[in-house]
Amino acid sequence: MTKRTVALERVPQWIVPTLWLLGLIVISVQARADIEGLVIHGFASVYYTDTTQQNAPTGNTGFKLDNLDLYIAPSLTDRIRALMEDVVEFDDWTKPGSDNGQPAVDIERLQIGYLFSDDLTVWMGRFHTPYGYWNTAYHHGAQLQPTVMRPQFLGFEDHGGILPAHTNGIWATGRRDIGPGRFTYDAYLGNGSRILDGVIDMQNAGNADSHTAFGARLGYEFLGGALDSLWVGAHGFSEQIDNFISGVRTAQTDVKVIGAFGHWTPGDWELMSEYYRFDNKAHGTGGPSHESSAFYVEADYIFFGLITPLARFEQDTLSQDDGYFQYLLGGKSYKRSLVGVRYDLTPQTAIKIDANHTDMKRDGGQSYNEAHVQVAIRF
């Protein structure tokens, strides 16, 4: 009896039929994809970080895997649409030494919609919350966004973000040509978020707290003329967000946000900015409201269609008397100046280098420097 035979005898009997079943599923999916045009698309990226930050929540200097993002967007009929997106990501915003670097699969989007016309599409499920520009334009698409990292305050819920980047609910969106451009709108209603041990939870499995989130984004995009491609607008949302520590509710906060955004690509320039103003107060009390703000401005310029130097400044000023920010892992004030360059090796592959100086001393944090090198692809 050979070593190979002995090894085969030790294989559990369920392995072979399971492998056959998986093979048949793959063949079936491929066949249906060939017939129905169902194609899997995605994004992937890897990067290197050099940081002087002590006990950085995203880890110390070294190489890192970013996200593997896979999505399909079948058109079931001329009217019925669907979008399903899964992300394999790494838990790198926990306390150092706990569960850093553990891979997890996240259902990023799961939405089914009906197209009434260009004026109106209605989606239901989990979607990217429509505020500002960055959250719906780039999101997990690292190859699409100009920099390696998002503005910190626009980070994902489990990566230090201070806004619910996702909503589980219903979303109406559309556009209409008016004058020299088009009017755009988004309106949504969904489960209210909550904070669980420092992280925003958008309650995918159900609305345990029975709170409702609602918001809207209104914009106008200029088409032609001196302001061609300029998209400007306003956004806002409101919800009650409760904080829980080890399952015990410690605070209830009425969160109200209003702001504005703009994105413009005149010639080889790309200019963008977003502003958020918070007016939060403890729920059910006559106490004072707490004002906070966050914004970024960024400018990029493309040389020869390939090389893009860029600069960004971002800042948030967050009240630590606010029952919302005082419990969030990323709820501290900071300032960040960033410069970088992007090189498009191919239309699907980008190499990005950027460096930033971050000052978090206002709320007792550190002042530190970081540099990133990233290779990002889409397929």
Image: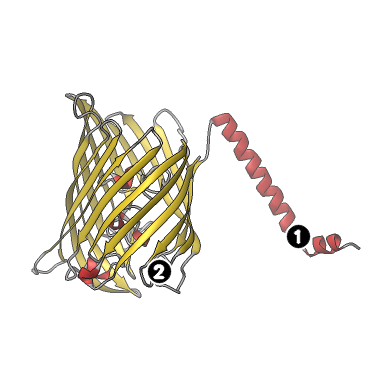
**Which quadrant of the figure has residue 343?**
top left
Q: Is residue 70 at all visible to an observer of this figure?
A: no
Q: Residue at x 61, y 37 (%)?
A: 30
Residue, disc 2 = 94
Tell me the kind of residue under disc 1: Gln
Percent of width and height locating residue 21: 68, 48
Question: Mark 1 and mark 2: span between their CA atoms?
Answer: 40 Å
Q: Residue at x 27, y 71 (%)?
A: 365
**Disc 1 secondary structure class:** loop
Please tell me which residue is depicted at 43% across the width and 67% down the height of the picture: 60
Secondary structure category for the residue under label 2: loop
Q: On the rendered structure, is 322 left or right of 121?
A: left
Q: Is residue 364 left or right of residue 137?
A: left
Name the spot of residue 255 as percent of width and height, x first.
Answer: 19, 59
Question: Foreground: 27 or 154?
Answer: 154
| Residue depicted at x 32% and y 57% | 356
Picture quadrant of residue 261:
top left
Which residue is the site of mark 1? 13
